[in-house]
Amino acid sequence: MKRVLLALVSLTFIVVQLSEGSEYADKQQQLRDHQLKKSSPTAESRAKVLANQYGRKAEDADRETSRWEIPNDQAAEVFEIAAYDAGATSPIIVETTYDAYESYRADSPAARKQSIEIGTEISYFKYKEPGVMQEKGIMYGIFADYTMHSGSPVALESFGDIIDQYINNYYFGIDGLFKYGQVDYSSGSTGSIDNINDFMFEITGKAGYEIALNENTVLVPYTGVGYRYLNDDSGGKLSTTGAAGYERESNYVYIPFGFETNTLLADGWSWGFGAEYDLFVGGKQKSHLEDVSSSLSTVENDQDSGYGVRGSIKIAKQSEKINWMVEPFVRYWNVDNSSTAVVTCGGTPCAVGYEPANESLDYGVRIGGAF
C-alpha cells in the first residue's frame, strides 16, 4: 500500500512538472514567433542586467538577446526568452529573476516614479518700465524640482482612455527656484545706480497627464498654480542725479498652462523641450517710500492684468543612479499698469501713485542632476 501511495505521489509530481514545463515551452515558442526587431544599445544594456541578475557572464546574455530590441510592452516576454536560452528550466527561476530585473529598471532615473532634480543656474535679467527706467544684471540661482509620475505611461487608444488610464499616466510636480544677483539701474530723468541687490524666489505646483507618443517619446501637458516674489532693494543709495532709491517688492500669482516632452536616444541620452503660458491671476507691488523719507508711507498697488511665457530645451545623460542635464531657458513677463494708491506724508494723504506697465526678460542656462 505504501509503495502504491508513493508511486501515485511521484506520478502526480511528474505530471505537474511536465504540465508546467510544457506550458512554458509553448509560451517560449509563441514568443519566438513574435519576430522581434533588430537589436539596439538599450537591448544590449538590458541583456547585461539579465546576465548579472541571473549570475551568468554578460557576453552569454548578449549573444542570446542581441538579436532583439526591447520596447517597454515586450520587455517581460523578451526577458523570459533570454532566461530560457541562458539555461533556466524552471518557471520559478524565470519569475524570480525577472522580478530582480524589474526592480533594477524601476531604480533608474528615467523610470523612477519619484525623482528630485537639483542644480544651479545663471542668467541675464532685465526689467524695464518703457519710457521710465530699466534694470539689468547677472543673476545666480539654485533650483529643486520634485516629480511624481507613472513612470511608464500607457498608450491611449480612445478618448475614454484618458480617464480610464489616468492611474497609469498621472504626473505631479513641485518646482522651486531661488536667485540672487546685482543689477544696474538707469533712467533718463533720475540718473543711474549700480550694484543694486536683487533676489527672487518662485514655487510652482503642477498636475498633468503623460501621453506616450511612441516607444521613446512622452508628452506631458500640465497646469497648476505658481507664485513669484522679487525684491529689488536700492534703499540707502543715491543716483548720479541725487535721487534716493527705495526697496520694491513684487508679488505675482499665476496659473501655468504648458507641456514638456522627453525623447529617449541611444546610449542613455535623452532630450526634450517645454513651453508654458502663464495666466496672470493677480499681483501686489509694495514700494517702501519710507526709505526716501521717514514721513512717507509704504505704497501698495494691486496688479490684475498681464501674462508670462517661458520655454526651454533639456539634454540629459543617464548614469547608473543620476540623470545629468543641461537646460537653456528663457522667461518673459509683461504686466500692465497697476491700480492707484494713496501716498501719505506724515500720515496725511499727499499724492497718488501707481506701478507703471513693465516687462521682465530672464534667459540663461541651468545644470543639474535628477536622483
Image (cartoon, rainbow, N blue to C red):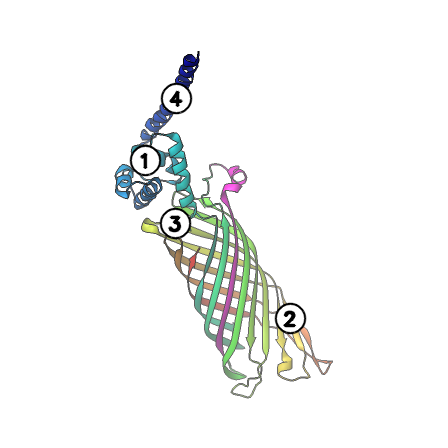
Residue labelled with disc 2: 301
**Quarter containing the C terminus:** bottom left
Q: Nearer the viewer, residue 149 or 355?
A: 149
Q: Residue at x 62, y 83 (%)?
A: 292
Q: Nearer the viewer, mark 1 or mark 2?
A: 1
Image position, residue 271 (x, y; %): 38, 53
Relative to residue 294, is residue 180 depicted above or below?
A: above
Q: Which residues are magenta?
A: 157-184
Mark 4 in CB contact with mark 2 (< 8 angstroms): no
Tell me if 263 is positioned left or right of 239 in this view. Answer: left
Residue labelled with disc 3: 263
Residue labelled with disc 1: 82
Residue labelled with disc 4: 19
Mark 4 Cα-neighbour bin, 10 Å: few <14, some 14–19, many ≥20: few
Instruction: Tell me the CA gap for discs 4 and 3.
Output: 43 Å
Mark 4 in CB contact with mark 3 (< 8 angstroms): no
Residue furthest to the top in view is 1
Q: Amino acid at mark 3?
A: Thr
Q: Secondary structure at mark 1?
A: helix
Q: Amino acid at mark 4?
A: Ser
Q: Secondary structure at mark 2?
A: strand
